[in-house]
Image (tube, rainbow, N blue to C red):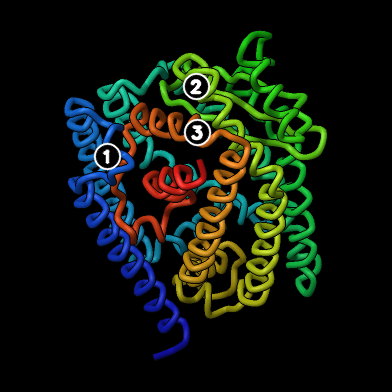
Amino acid sequence: METPQIIFWIIIGILVADFIVGKIVSAKNYAWRDKKPSKYLSDVYDDDKYNTFQAYSKANYKIGTLTSSLMFILTLAVFFWEGFAWLDQFLSQYIESKIWLSIAFFAAIAVVTGIISLPFSIYDTFVIEERFGFNKTTPRTFIFDMLKNLLLSVVIGGVLLFLILQIYYATQTWFWLLAWIIISLFSIFMAEFYSTLIVPLFNKQKPLEEGELKEKISEFARRAGFQLDNVYVIDNSKRSTRANAYFTGLGKKKRIVLFDTLINDFTPDEIVGVLAHEIGHYKKHHIHKSLVLSLLNTGFVLFLFGLFVGRDAFSQALGAEEAKFHLGAIVFMVLYSPVSTATGMLMNKLSRNNEGEADDFAAQHGQSQALINALKKLARKNLSNLTPHPWHVFLNYSHPPLAERVKRLKENI
């Protein structure tokens, strides 16, 4: 068997294995929804709310299984029928530039994927989320969000891809390093300015108004030794009833953002408990550490990518005659996916540790019970799974399960 054929069957094996493992873990996690919650969470759901959670979980499991199964079948069909090579040949009839050919190739795949996934996105938003009281998105907002995301993908993604392709064809030896520098600079820039440049395209943000909540937040920040100049409220209620808060930005641009749904449905003490957790992330340097690890991982991926993307065997595995950047990229993404899954699990483990440290910070500053109350209310409001399967947690959770967090916080009261 020739090398391209071996690569092809390795690709198919990886795709099949990934699908089977994903379905097994998903099925186990779904089955565990019937388990009795931990004693620490016995007061989260009453009977009516528990039944609602069960129905919501079932609806999501069905649509998730249908979506992933369809995408798996279509992906296999494209590989077996040499769809990527066909698309390359079709576009090559009209585009001579190697750079613009690759851009058109990835754009075509993005368009087709978007068209296939659109009905499922509509169903999820306007049927499932609507049925269970989460959706506040109007058709107009949904369409404009989709168009804005498309525009951002074209402008930002297109420019980055163009620069990377220019570097690749100009200097293949140092391609990975130069591409890493550009992507790193962009990532740092987005970490710094995401809330001031991107978020306003979708949501309105305004400074938290004067009052009891702001006074309590300021008092806690002072006691915790944290200079907090920017607390903003975002109008998440225009799309969903879900509540949350997050920390964003670096240096002087750092800010805490509260969903308006959080302010409407939670007490000032509970919100301070949530903010204590978010401030803990900053005080423990989790944001900077995560950014550095992400950039190092990107550099490693680009280094390997630079070594293999130009090999003829990669493109020939998809049915082409010679090496093409975009075909090599498709093959590399699949072959690297097991490593990506492993690094993803490691990053999730580190993230769960960070979440625990942030909870500890809140507890050390007298916010254990307030944070517990807030976490339980968030779980109840968002119909969260209180009994996730350990495999699902290991593979997919960036936060510890709620029972584990509550137990840890109670021990620190």
Separation of residues labelled 1 and 3 (CA atoms)? 28 Å
Amino acid type shown at disc 1: Asn
Residue sitting at 65 percent across and 53 percent down?
A: 290
Amino acid type shown at disc 2: Leu
Residue 95 position, x and y percent, is 62, 53
The residue carrying pointer 1 sits among few (fewer than 14), some (14 to 19) or many (20 or more) residues within 10 Å by Cα, namely: some
Query: Split into 4 quadrants, where in the image is the N terminus?
Result: bottom left
Q: Quadrant of residue 203?
A: top right
Separation of residues labelled 2 and 1 (CA atoms)? 24 Å
Residue 164 position, x and y percent, is 72, 57
Dot placed on the residue nearer the N-terminal end, 3 or 2: 2
Which of discs 3 and 2 lies nearer the camera? The answer is 3
Residue 186 shows in the view:
yes
Dot placed on the residue nearer the N-terminal end, 2 or 1: 1
- Classify 300 as above or below 193: below
Identify the disc placed on residue 371. Answer: 3
> Which residue corresponds to mark 2?
262
- Circle 1 — which element? helix
Amino acid type shown at disc 3: Leu
- Classify 174 as above or below 269: below
Identify the disc placed on residue 60. Answer: 1
- Circle 3 — which element? helix
Residue sitting at 68 percent across and 9 percent down?
A: 210
- Left or right? Give the position of 113 relative to 183: left
- Left or right? Give the position of 157 relative to 370: right
- Asked if the residue under mark 2 is in contact with the one under mark 3, i.e. CB atoms within 8 Å, the reply is no
- Classify 29 as above or below 157: below
- Classify 383 as above or below 334: above
The residue carrying pointer 2 sits among few (fewer than 14), some (14 to 19) or many (20 or more) residues within 10 Å by Cα, namely: many
